[in-house]
């Protein structure tokens, strides 16, 4: 395994730029340690790298701009997973003893593997926009936090959007919708929701798996050409996304009829395809660009000081900003926990979990953090570990992403029963009992 702190391997330095400080030492009495699982190498690195850079730069910003959290400096150490579940578990085991109080596994497969471990270790997992959809139920999944959305909310919004385009959800009856998906826990996660919507609206769902990492998709797109679906939903990651767009172009499938999950709609997915991806649509949980105040602060206080991670022109890109948002919510969980357990103190995993269950970021607080316009307000609870289902569609015009829809909210009338049923099933299999109201207050 390769443990990397604030310096990257030579190969990563050549391609992605450097981080600029020494490896983090074990957390001291005045240091809040953040373990950072990353993949800067392999077929998923073009997407994983900006995500990781955004997290690093936000930590550096909090130290530079605010002096840490109420005087507590933030430290971090990276561990390279290559998106591999076994390496992710090794990284977790290596870093958890260094004072870790929260993890972002940065992969659904790693999340599945860690979900059984974290209750014993009492360390929460932030899985913003990924992981187990059922883990929105904090009554069963006490340590998982799929903040801002799950794959079920993503799939639900996509069907809502297609229904709107057709003039109503009833107009989907008889339509063909193909799901071209990464053949992994990540890619399979939206299927239960899509199956449910299929029953409700009468469209035909065609499931087309793609073997990881997705560099070979000819058979999948021959199937698309054979089936002639009205729409294609792309559930890809890394090189799979750009490959899918190139294959769609080669087989003549209209890109304007393709809709990706929010992990299939960033700059690395389309930049090599350029005009060939024009008209392609994808979900997005956050804004992009360099106009938000938090991005301006990072440029001024981190990159202009020579402390930036990765290239300056990447700052504010879709996945960079998403990494920043994930880290911001982790930091705010620490800040919220300090309000209860003591300002100026280092928070434990249990305390950070309380902070994650009591996030209350309204417009005023987002403005204070420089996050106005980057995300929408989010509020969590002991039972609601998701906090928000706000998402928009953006469209590639051949040169840049532009938002092409208003905000959608996932349909809770569909999602809540599904989440509870799945959580209850998981609890039964694992012989878990739901948290009581008293446990939620503790």
Image (tube, helix red, strand yellow):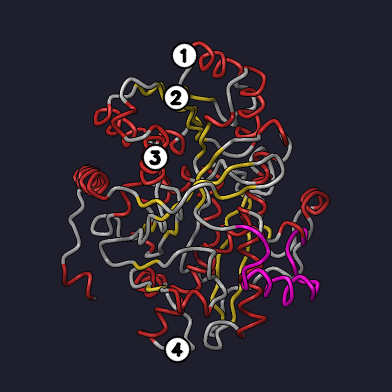
Q: Dot 3: few (<14), some (14–19), or many (≥20) neighbours within 10 Å?
A: many
Q: CA distance from mark 3 to mark 2?
A: 12 Å
Q: CA distance from mark 2 to mark 1?
A: 9 Å
Secondary element at image label 3: helix
The residue lying at 36 percent from left, 41 percent from top is: 156
Q: Dot 2: few (<14), some (14–19), or many (≥20) neighbours within 10 Å?
A: many
Question: 200 or 45, which is in the foreground?
Answer: 200
The residue lying at 48 percent from left, 15 percent from top is: 228
Question: 291 or 298, which is in the foreground?
Answer: 291
Q: Nearer the viewer, mark 4 or mark 3?
A: 3
Q: Dot 1: few (<14), some (14–19), or many (≥20) neighbours within 10 Å?
A: few
Q: CA distance from mark 3 to mark 1?
A: 21 Å
Kindly identify which numbered label has been placed on residue 155.
Answer: 3
Q: Position of residue 435 (x, y in %)?
A: 20, 62
Q: Nearer the viewer, mark 2 or mark 4?
A: 2
Q: Position of residue 30 (x, y in %)?
A: 55, 85
Q: Nearer the viewer, mark 4 or mark 1?
A: 1
In this rendering, position of residue 5 left or right of residue 162: right
Secondary element at image label 1: helix
In this rendering, position of residue 302 left or right of residue 156: right
Kindly identify which numbered label has been placed on residue 227.
Answer: 1
Secondary element at image label 2: strand
Secondary element at image label 4: loop
Most extreme residue toward the top is 226
Q: Dot 4: few (<14), some (14–19), or many (≥20) neighbours within 10 Å?
A: some
Give the vertical position of 192 relative to 368 (above or below): above
Residues drawn in magenta: 288-312
Kindly identify which numbered label has been placed on residue 343.
Answer: 4
Q: Earlier in the sequence, mark 2 or mark 4?
A: 2
Q: Earlier in the sequence, mark 4 or mark 3?
A: 3
């Amino acid at each position: 395994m390769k443990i990397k702190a604030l310096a990257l391997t030579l190969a990563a330095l050549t391609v992605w730029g450097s981080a600029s400080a020494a490896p983090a030492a074990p957390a001291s009495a005045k240091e809040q340690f953040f373990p950072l699982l990353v993949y800067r190498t392999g077929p998923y690195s073009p997407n994983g790298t900006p995500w990781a850079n955004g997290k690093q730069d936000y930590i550096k910003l909090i130290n530079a701009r605010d002096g840490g959290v109420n005087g507590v400096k933030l430290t971090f150490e990276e561990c390279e997973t290559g998106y591999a579940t076994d390496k992710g578990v090794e990284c977790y085991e290596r870093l958890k003893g260094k004072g870790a109080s929260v993890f972002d596994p940065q992969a659904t497969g790693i999340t599945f593997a860690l979900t059984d471990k974290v209750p014993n270790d009492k360390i929460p997992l932030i899985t913003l926009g990924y992981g187990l959809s059922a883990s929105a139920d904090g009554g069963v999944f006490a340590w998982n936090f799929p903040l801002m959305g799950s794959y079920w909310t993503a799939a639900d919004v996509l069907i809502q959007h297609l229904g709107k385009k057709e003039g109503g959800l009833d107009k989907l009856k008889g339509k063909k919708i193909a799901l071209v998906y990464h053949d992994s826990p990540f890619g399979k996660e939206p299927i239960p929701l899509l199956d449910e919507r299929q029953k409700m609206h009468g469209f035909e769902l065609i499931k087309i798996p793609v073997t990881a990492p997705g560099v070979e998709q000819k058979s999948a797109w021959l199937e698309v050409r054979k089936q002639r679906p009205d729409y294609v939903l792309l559930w890809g990651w890394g090189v799979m996304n750009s490959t899918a767009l190139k294959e769609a172009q080669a087989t003549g499938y209209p890109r304007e009829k393709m809709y990706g999950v929010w992990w299939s709609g960033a700059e690395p997915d389309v930049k090599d395809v350029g005009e060939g991806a024009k008209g392609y649509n994808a979900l997005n949980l956050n804004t992009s660009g360099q106009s938000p105040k938090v991005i301006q602060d990072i440029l001024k206080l981190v990159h202009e000081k020579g402390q930036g991670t990765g290239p300056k022109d990447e700052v504010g890109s879709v996945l960079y900003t998403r990494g920043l948002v994930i880290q911001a919510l982790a930091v705010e969980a620490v800040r919220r926990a300090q309000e209860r357990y003591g300002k100026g103190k280092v928070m434990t995993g249990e305390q950070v979990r309380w902070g994650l269950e009591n996030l209350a970021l309204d417009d005023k607080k987002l403005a204070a953090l420089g996050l106005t316009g980057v995300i929408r307000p989010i509020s969590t609870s002991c039972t609601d570990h998701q906090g928000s289902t706000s998402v928009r569609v953006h469209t590639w015009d051949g040169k840049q992403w532009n938002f092409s829809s208003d905000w959608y909210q996932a349909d809770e009338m569909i999602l809540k029963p599904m989440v509870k049923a799945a959580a209850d099933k998981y609890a039964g299999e694992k012989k878990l009992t739901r948290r009581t109201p008293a446990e939620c207050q503790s």
